[in-house]
Image (cartoon, helix red, strand yellow):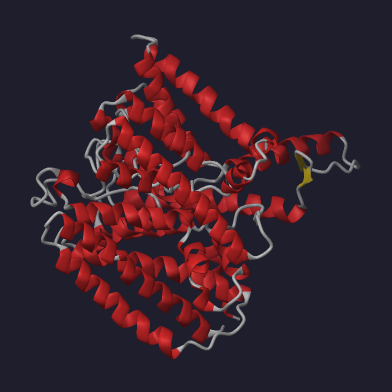
Amino acid sequence: MNVKTILNILSALLTIMGLTMLFPAFVSWLYNESDVSAFLFSASVTIFFGLPIWFLTRKNRKLRNRDGFTIVTFSWIITAFAGALPFYYSGSIPIFTDAFFESMSGVTTTGASIIGNIQTMPHLENGIESLSHGILFWRSFLQWVGGMGIILFTIAILPLLGVGGVQLFKAEVPGPVTDKIRPRVRETAKLLWIVYLGITVVETILLGIAGMGWFDAICHSFTTMPTGGFSTRNASIEAYNNGVIEYIIIIFMIIAGTNFSLHFRAISGNLNSYKIDKEFKAYFFFILYITIIIFLCIGINGDLNEENFRSSLFQTVSILTTTGFSSADYELWPYFVQSLLLCLMFIGGMGGSTGGGMKIIRIYVLFKYMAHSTQRMLHAKAIIPIRIGDRYISEDVIKNTLGFFLFYVSIFVFTTLALTLMNVNLESAIGAAASAIGNIGPGLADFGPSDNYALLPSFGKWLLSFCMLLGRLEIFTIMVIFSNVFWK
């Protein structure tokens, strides 16, 4: 491996993280809060370690695939550790394990939080709402940066790296088909970030006009677009009791769960890109039909009114896109509805979106493969290719999809069993495992939308943090590092 090049990029990333801490420091200064020094100290520590290493390893070499996987994996770990420093040094989260969990949940856009339990954090009497504006901004900013990928962010704004980014792009966007909008990876990253930033600004303006405070509007836009789900309120979006705000967030969650290359093509004038995309049609199908089913289930014993429809639509979109916002406590809904939402946790958004889960395109390929296998049983000698639209799906893509599915399910089962070994009840363990690897946030039972992960044992927090990382980098990027072949 090109150790110097790897260290150069990781140290540049660490330095950037230190510089970005100046933003929440400014927010704290603006609100005359006491944690300005914590942000400045955290920034100094990260820059102190990052800048000298970057300076000493400036001579870059060509990256190989092995280097790309290493950089991507360790960049997320380093970012999570650096992101935990302001939480820890400000005293907002005085236990480093908890601070790391919150940070990893942020950068992986999971949205699972340990804040809000009076037993473990008596200094935060009002939970999340007791945090300073600087810390609330930092939580949201971590998710916003993590949404499109810290590596794409680095390639887009750091021409000083001077290395080819194809290996990093392939490792960071490991879906079934990596769709490059432009031939050059750096140009692709810039275009994606322009779209991402533009949509974030539009959402902020709309939320502010709808009646949400401007600070809250910025924070919620920062956590909607990465499908992260961190909120500035304990009750999440339900706290605002505003239908217009909920519909705005629904629309932008749908946008965030859509392949961003489709947004770019639409902005470029090709609106038909949505219409002809098979995955987008399946995505819309899930949203529509699951919403109708949930609406009928929760309204059958009550009123089939607009409020119940809005709650059904909101929670369907929130869970499917793995955002994790809540406008209602779905644990009060029928068990069948909770089971449907659990299934949505595994599906996730579209490939090329900021959503987590297995991705709709993989589910689509799996169903196509099942139908293909049935046809082959009837016509053993027939050559029947698998197609999605006009595109033929190669055997390699099918094998990778099957491998991903088996890895995903195996990790889910292992994590569930490990959590029950820590005396976590089965329903809570299932919800937490599905939530962590799917980068969703809220789970079931003890870790539902109105609860948090504060009482989870320390080892459980580290385990779920690892699952969040696996889910964010879609398993293979991490698992390849544990293979013998990688180190030979």
Seen from the viewer's position, the closer of residues 336 and 175 is 175
Q: Is residue 324 visible?
A: no
Q: Tell me where residue 103 appears, x and y as whole percent.
A: 31, 59
Q: Which residue is rendered at x = 17% and y = 44% of the image?
A: 129
On the picture, is 470 further left or further right than 485? left
Q: Which residue is rendered at x = 67% and y = 33% of the image?
A: 275
State the residue lying farthest toward the right.
381
Q: Which residue is rendered at x = 53% and y = 24% of the image?
A: 288
Seen from the viewer's position, the closer of residues 214 and 437 is 214
Seen from the viewer's position, the closer of residues 126 and 207 is 207
On the picture, is 140 further left or further right than 175? left
Identify whether 44 is placed above or below 267. below
Q: What is the quadrant of residue 102 in the picture? A: bottom left
Identify whether 122 is placed above or below 374. below
Q: Tell me where residue 233 appears, x and y as whole percent.
A: 23, 40
Q: Is residue 363 visible?
A: yes
Identify whether 368 is placed above or below 152. above
Q: What is the quadrant of residue 285 in the picture? A: top right
Mark count? 0
- Quadrant where the C terminus lies? bottom right
